[in-house]
Image: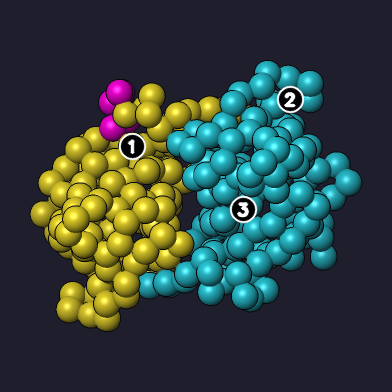
Chain colours: A yellow, B cyan
Amino acid sequence: MIVRDLNQARQTERHVFSKGWDSVRLLLKSDKMGFSFHITTIHAGAELPMHYKHHFECVYCIEGVGSIEDGAPGEIHRIGPGTMYALDQNDRHILRADPGAPMVMACVFNPPVTGSEVHQDDGSYALESESA
Amino acid sequence: MIVRDLNQARQTERHVFSKGWDSVRLLLKSDKMGFSFHITTIHAGAELPMHYKHHFECVYCIEGVGSIEDGAPGEIHRIGPGTMYALDQNDRHILRADPGAPMVMACVFNPPVTGSEVHQDDGSYALESESA
């Protein structure tokens, strides 16, 4: 059994930072669960165009409010605590946090993230072989 | 893109009930994400011996406090908001919620749960072929 604590993991290299968001990777590919599990904070007012061409992602909102735009441009869904969205079509999307407070999200990736990915210019994560 | 809301899903057959817990299955095998994603409530004071022989499970505590016993008997870890545990060895375990308040957990299963499983006498979920 693996047991990890969010606040302890924040003090380690599991905590990664990018423009408009930061994320604590509680499970990575190396944990051999077949998926990775992250607690990601979307900074207040952030607007994040993303396109995971190689990964399915499920996102569950724990705190905060904002919106997800499905496609670019596309339909906009409001997000608050209890909303889940799943990118089952490698969907291009734009995530926006309302001003005033960050959003805290639980995120699951399949295939699992290795921990060394950064967003590429097209908003995707590279597959491991591509990022080598 | 799939978008689902916890409170809406509570009113559907996605909400399943058992002794000491209930669970809202926001993603199931039929969603073809390669994992399932559930928001599970462990009732206050519940003691749940479990043994997922056929599934890996990651559990992230959103609300409430309790403990996880790794093995039976085994080492006990306290759980509160921000604690994650991952059953990467098909570990036998006992989950306990402290009296006074329920625990709310985000759970990920690999392989994904179909939605028709119940806990068997040995605390496991059957694989789909076994439950047919």
Please tell me whether mark 3 or mark 1 is closer to you in this view: 3
Amino acid tagged 3? Thr
The chain holding disc 3 is: B
Are marks 3 and 1 in one subunit? Answer: no
How far apart are the alpha carbons under marks 1 and 2? 27 Å
Image coords of residue A100 (percent x, y):
19, 55
Q: Residue at x 61, y 24 (%)?
A: B77
Q: Residue at x 28, y 69 (%)?
A: A68
Image coords of residue A23 (percent x, y):
29, 41
Q: Residue at x 47, y 28 (%)?
A: A4
Q: Quadrant of the C terminus of chain A?
A: top left
Of the numbered discs 3 and 2, the one sitting upstream in the chain is: 3
In the rendered structure, which segment of residues is drawn in magenta?
A11-15
Please tell me whether mark 3 or mark 2 is closer to you in this view: 3
Residue under pointer 3: B40
Amino acid tagged 2? Gly
How far apart are the alpha carbons under marks 3 and 2? 21 Å
Few, some or many C-alpha atoms within 10 Å of disc 3 (few <14, some 14-19, many ≥20)?
Answer: many
Label 2 element class: strand
* Vertical comparison of A122 with B123: above or below: below
Task: Tell me, for residue A24, which label it has, or none.
Answer: 1
For the view shown, which residue lies furthest in the right direction?
Answer: B121
The chain holding disc 1 is: A
Residue under pointer 2: B71
